[in-house]
Amino acid sequence: MILPRPLASRRLAPLLALTLAASLSACIIVPLPVGTTSASTASSGGPAPATTQCPRPAETAAYAAEVLRRANALRAGKDLAPLRASDRLTRAAQAHACDNAAHQTYRHVGSDGAALMSRLARVGYAPRRATENTGLGFAGSPERLVDFWLGSPKHRANLLDPKVTEAGLGMAAGAKPAWVLVMATPLR
């Protein structure tokens, strides 16, 4: 921005800097991988989240199995079919867990604005129905995480949704670990 000489005075410079900072504070910049163009991301369900690769705790596979076991025990108690593990749902859940861990949140919308359906499209999963549970914290305790979800009516309803058949869990290390459980039924 080029200002006429009189406006660039020392007295107005702080005010101008404040105005410029306020107008830019609403800008969100999402870095894209090198070589990615907006045309190539549009065909894959939109831009990638700010963080898709992140440290995963060594116990992630064991924790995922425990979360699925507990969810299926709950479902069995209600005469519901068990959830099967899905690699594509796990990839979608892991990418969102990385994004949530990077921002230390457990939101259902990614830092790039992508909701669950967009994130599923990125991994090539076309759902008939899809739900998601998220969590932040519960380091080393998938049991406490599932108990947290059971204490929330909406998260409990997701775990007991009779219309979902598959699940994938993502977990990402951070100051507090981020967890994402995606449950869905493929369109087929």
Image (spheres, rainbow, N blue to C red):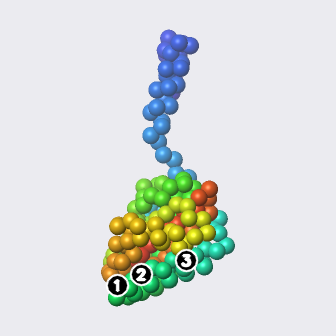
Rendering coords of residue 183 (x, y %): 42, 76
Task: State which mark lies toward you, 1 or 3.
Answer: 1
Tell me: 19 left or right of 102: left
Q: Secondary structure at mark 1?
A: loop
Separation (CA) of disc 1 from disc 3: 21 Å
Name the quadrant containing residue 55: bottom right
Q: Mark 3 sits on what residue?
A: 64
Q: Residue at x 34, y 72 (%)?
A: 157
> Label 1 neighbourhood size at 10 Å, few (<14), some (14-19), many (20+)?
few
Q: Residue at x 40, y 87 (%)?
A: 76
Three-letter amino acid code at the position of disc 1: Lys
Separation (CA) of disc 1 from disc 2: 7 Å
Q: Secondary structure at mark 3?
A: helix
State if disc 2 and disc 1 touch (CB < 8 Å): yes
Three-letter amino acid code at the position of disc 3: Ala
The tag earlier along the polypeptide, 1 or 3, is 3
Q: Mark 2 sits on what residue?
A: 74
168, above or below 113, in the image: below
